[in-house]
Amino acid sequence: MIPDRFTAAALRWPDQAALSMGGERLTYRDCARISDVLAHRLSASLRDSRPVALDSTKSLFTVLTMLACLRAGITYVPVDPAAPGPRARFMLEDAGVGAVLFESTEPQWLAGSPAGWQRLGLRDIAGAGLRELASSDGGAGGPAGGPSPDAIAYILYTSGSTGEPKGVPITHANADAFVGWGCSYFDIGPGDHVAVHAPLHFDLPVLDVYVGLSRGATVSPIDAQTLLFPQAVVRFLRQHGITVLYAVPSALIALLNHSDLVRGGLPALRLLLYAGEEFQAPTLRRLMDAVPQARVFNLYGPIESNVIAAVEVGPEHRDAPRIPLGWPAAGARLFVLDEEDRPIVVEGATGEIVVAGPSVFPGYLNRPDLTGPSRVAVRGAGGEWLCHRTGDLGSWGPGRVLRFHGRRDGMIKTRGFRVELGEVEAVLCRHPGIERAAAVAVPHPELTNLIRAFVVRRAGGELDEAGLRAWLAGRMPGYMIPHHIEFREHLPTTTTGKVARRALVEDTATRHG
């Protein structure tokens, strides 16, 4: 399990820097002691064994508390500090938490929360600063033998189609299967400096934090203020000699467009990983040119399983229309199903991607109505597998590489034709004057749907709608060309950095309904 991996790393590299942030550096020996003390004192402070909410502000205290919870067998629910109060309270009530943990000041979203929740300041529980904790005697942190593999390690929340977030519980075994794969797949080790770019309530930091701390690397969280400014992020990456960076494409594109990354590069960077959404090939080529010494990997998987496929992006992909998803990861067994839920074996035929394997979550929290439809039994080589439906469309390519064809719910009908909105976006992004694009469907009483595109010009570009339509006419049939094209300075994003397509749809409905 992850606590065992960290303990082994602390014994092997006790004097190696484990965490670094804001001028403070803690060794593996320090972090082992601190997390042990926190685990012991948290266990003693909690009234019951219910999950705890963790205000996931980027700080060393928060990261060490996450580790302490794992060591003590305490399920934690990371909460976005900027989450609206009603949303945060819904998540915590849904998760059945008994306590809320925060570093020093109660978060704003706690206002109006049930009085029955314990409110625990981490600094109060610790009773001292991190340096003092590192030399204290706190006793054993976790239960004998460690947490059960089937116990819930943490619960992440993702948007639900009903408008209410849905809980994704991840067991210790689920998390360990992914972390174990990450430790073996990437050559991360002592001497590496791993940035934590994504927010802690997202699934990307599971790799940054737990793989980094299992392999003797130095993990460096990027604070929220720095993340507001792309140039500040680039400065952070250079000053800290970051060698491993994992982020969503939207964040990496912001570095391309709003910093001096292209001019100065990132000399220390050797591993660049991205996930969360499709990275359009033309823009990815620009990024790879800016950091030519770095190996680049496309990681794919839903929050319900973390990464299930991976591929190193090489020269052969630079001119491809779309970057493939790659080959199975973390013990995943992948299938592509046709409309009758039968496995597709021929190359090029499109169907829904489904997955079984040790990293796949046990089911949506308190939502059997969602878990049932998300599962499908698939008979394949070696027997029958209970798989999770990803909602993504894919196909098999040469060498059984998995290719991406967009979201199943991104397939629409317009003028009687089936259109994949992801394909529209991919073609738009091939235009040399376009940096980003998003396509949404607008219901129409006669044509079923009209396509509306939102486009961000490349810096210095003078592209207009007429010129873009003429260019598109030579590359896609007329029914696929967006009915309306809107140029924007930027596209809205979610708190995890992905394009907020729902916001675009709602904006369209408001202004053109």
Image (tube, rainbow, N blue to C red):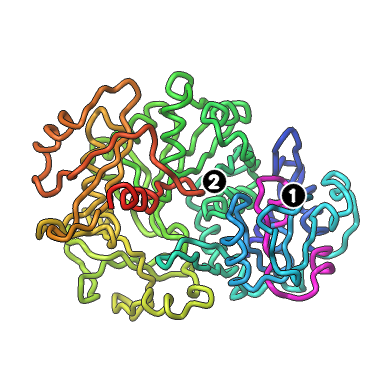
Location of residue 146 by image quarter? bottom right
Location of residue 234 by image quarter? top right
Q: Is residue 440 left or right of residue 213?
A: left
Distance between the alpha carbons at the discs numbered 2 and 1: 17 Å
- Is 352 within the magenta? no
What residue is at 40 percent from the left and 65 percent from the top?
161
SS of the residue at dot 1?
helix
Q: Is residue 422 left or right of residue 124?
A: left
What residue is at 65 percent from the left and 58 percent from the top?
5
Label 1: few (<14), some (14–19) or many (≥20) C-alpha neighbours in 10 Å: many
The one of 9 and 261 positioned closer to us in this rendering: 261
Instruction: Residue 249: give its label.
Output: none
The one of 129 and 171 positioned closer to us in this rendering: 129
Q: Position of residue 446 (x, y in %)?
A: 12, 60
**Which comes sooner in the sequence, label 2 or label 1?**
1
Q: Is residue 235 left or right of residue 11?
A: left
Question: Given contact means CB atoms under 8 Å apart, are the residues at marks 2 and 1 in contact?
Answer: no
- Is 52 within the magenta? yes
- Residue type pointed to by label 2: Ala
What residue is at 48 percent from the left and 43 percent from the top?
247
Q: Position of residue 388 (x, y in %)?
A: 39, 71
Name the residue beneath numbered marker 2: 198
Q: Position of residue 493 (x, y in %)?
A: 44, 45
Count of number-bearing discs: 2
- Residue type pointed to by label 1: Phe
Q: Which residues are magenta?
A: 40-65
The one of 399 and 140 positioned closer to us in this rendering: 140
Q: Position of residue 429 (x, y in %)?
A: 26, 37
Name the residue beneath numbered marker 1: 61
What residue is at 72 percent from the left and 40 percent from the top?
17
